Image: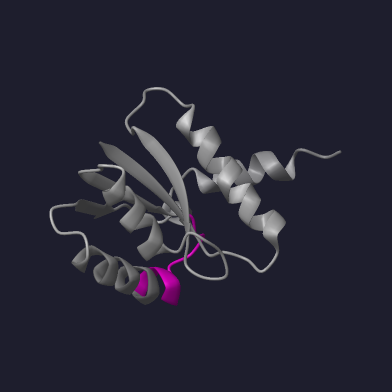
Amino acid sequence: MHILLLVAHGSRREESNIEIASLSNKISTLEPKEFDKVMPAFLEFASPSIPEAIKECTEVGATKVTILPYFLSAGVHITRDIPNEITEASEGSPGLEINVVDYFGSRDEIAEILMKTALDIK
């Protein structure tokens, strides 16, 4: 089983965390189905945390986890905090293959998405 973890910062504002869960659900409906399941995970302020989510992946029988950091820039969370959380969590999940892909903001398509958004005047 291959699980995609959409990792976001997390917020004290519950509505913001619900948006990430909703985005995870939308991603899970896309074709082709590269992942058996898509789950949200949070760096701080919300659950599940990255270690909690990785543990849950193991408990549901995942053999592979892809982590997609939903961040716009390569700040300290991307360069230090998330890798540290993954390293710590992976120690408790031997045999689980964990891969981290580039953070969302590194994509070239971001400029196009921003322009489309800017032109969407209401």
Q: Residue 107 or 64: which is nearer the viewer? A: 64
Question: Going 29% across and 49% down the picture, which residue do you hit?
Answer: 59
How many numbered dots are placed on residues in this image? 0
Name the residue: 21% across, 59% down: 93
- Counting from the top left corner in percent of width and height, residue 49 is at 45, 64
Q: Position of residue 50 (x, y in %)?
A: 40, 62
Q: Nearer the viewer, residue 51 or 60?
A: 60
The answer to which image quadrant residue 33 occupies is top left
Q: Is residue 95 above or below residue 63?
A: below
Asked whether 77 falls inside the magenta stretch, the response is: yes
- Image quadrant in which you'd find residue 85: bottom left
Quarter placement of the C terminus: top right
Q: Is residue 51 left or right of residue 121?
A: left
Residue 90 in the image, given as x and y percentages of width and height: 23, 63
User: What colour scheme governs how the chains and residues are painted in the rendered image of this protein?
Assistant: one colour
Magenta range is 70-79
- Between 118 and 7, the residue placed more toward the observer is 7
Q: Residue farthest to the top? A: 31
